Amino acid sequence: MNFLATLKVALAALRVNKLRSALTMLGIIIGVGAVITMVAVGAGAQARVEDQIKSLGSNLIIILSGNFTSGGVRMGSGSQLTITEDDAYALAREIPAIQAAAPNLRGNGQVVFGNSNWATQIYGITPEYLEARQWDVVAGEAINPSHVDSAAKVVLMGQTVARTLFGDSDPVGETVRIRRVPHTIIGVLDRKGQSMIGQDQDDVVLIPISTARKRVLGGTQVKSRNVQNITVRVRDGGDVGATEQEMRALLRQRHKLQPSQEDDFFIRNLSEVLAAQEASSKILALLLAAVASVSLMVGGIGIMNIMLVSVTERTREIGLRMAVGARGRDILMQFLVEAVTLALIGGLIGIALGACASFAVGYFAGWRTEMSVTAVLLAFSFAAAVGVFFGFYPARTASRLVPIEALRHE
């Protein structure tokens, strides 16, 4: 008997008990749908981490000001401004692996345009900041050295602030008040999205560091060149770990720290943090897929159970077919095709169910999900493999029946 004839016989046998066939496929349907949904959720989590890496930029190191002790109580990082603009320039000048070192000041304040206002983060930066963060300007121009030298009242606006104050209008050239100081908008920053801690990176305005120091943020920062942090970008291909050690040694030397003294600054290697988060998301994706795969195994056991019941019910039919010339391999192929057909049909329905479930999770739960062709093909292939694996034993049992005994079966 050729394969096409075997397939026709197998399909006819499945149509005889439609409800039982549908219930048998249910395990495979749920299993494939669960695998696709869980893989899509895991892939979405991974993609989100990758977006965060892109938004922050690879090879990024942040140097934070240190702390001080008051009455035996140690304050947190940044409680005392211990690093300076000159530290940033020295790092860029003396360590070849550093592409850009950007000192910056940070504060909060109200940005006002006409009758609209918005509370946002204010960053005082140098032109190197945009290079260090790999942050493009999509409209207008960037802050340049002349703006810093003259303490110009100009501002680069993040997408969130621009959309809130100006809607769809072009804000370039307009004047806004930042802490009551008028500033001219010279550009709009490209979208950055959320940071790894869920902070909106587009909810920010950037002004020259000299302007921030003298006109906007003020306070003790006016009389010094101290800054809250320095953003450092290591050149592509550079050893981030070795560069971090060189930076620490240079800063300790500049700050005249003795070997017994602790650092008066903190260094944060963001690439290591993001790499750890990416590894965690991959493990999560694999774990979700593994848990969902259990449903496929349960579905396979269901197929084996029903096929064994089918062999028992159709023992006389098998004996009759053998009596008229069917060979053991023909019987084996027929039952194996039935099992695989159940698995494949269930797999196709499961793919559709998984796609709908992935969309529903993204729409109602607000999670990012990403379906991949690879995941769909793997789930479908696994369903076929389950059909072969769990259908082989019942098929072999049927093929080994003795014709005379099968015909006598009641």
Image: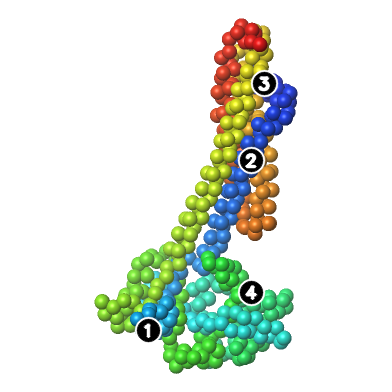
Circle 3 is placed at which residue position? Answer: 6
* Front of the two marks 4 and 2: 2
Q: What whole-number distance in Å separates the C-alpha atoms at marks 3 and 4? A: 64 Å
Q: Quadrant for residue 311, please give it.
A: top right
Circle 4 is placed at which residue position? Answer: 159
Q: Are marks 1 and 2 in contact (CB under 8 Å)?
A: no
Q: Is residue 259 left or right of residue 311?
A: left
* Mark 1 nearby-residue class (10 Å; few <14, some 14–19, many ≥20): few
What secondary structure is found at the residue carrying circle 4? helix
* Front of the two marks 1 and 2: 1
Q: Is residue 75 left or right of residue 394?
A: left
Circle 2 is placed at which residue position? Answer: 30
Decide which of tag 1 and tag 3 comes sooner along the chain. Answer: 3
Measured along the vertical axis of the image, is residue 407 above or below residue 87? above
Q: What whole-number distance in Å separates the C-alpha atoms at marks 1 and 4? A: 40 Å
Name the residue: 60% across, 34% down: 299
Decide which of tag 3 and tag 4 comes sooner along the chain. Answer: 3
* Mark 2 nearby-residue class (10 Å; few <14, some 14–19, many ≥20): many
* Front of the two marks 1 and 3: 1
Tell me which amino acid carries mark 2.
Answer: Ile
Q: What whole-number distance in Å separates the C-alpha atoms at marks 2 and 3? A: 28 Å
Measured along the vertical axis of the image, is residue 179 above or below residue 14? below
Q: What whole-number distance in Å separates the C-alpha atoms at marks 1 and 3? A: 86 Å
- Quarter holding the N terminus? top right
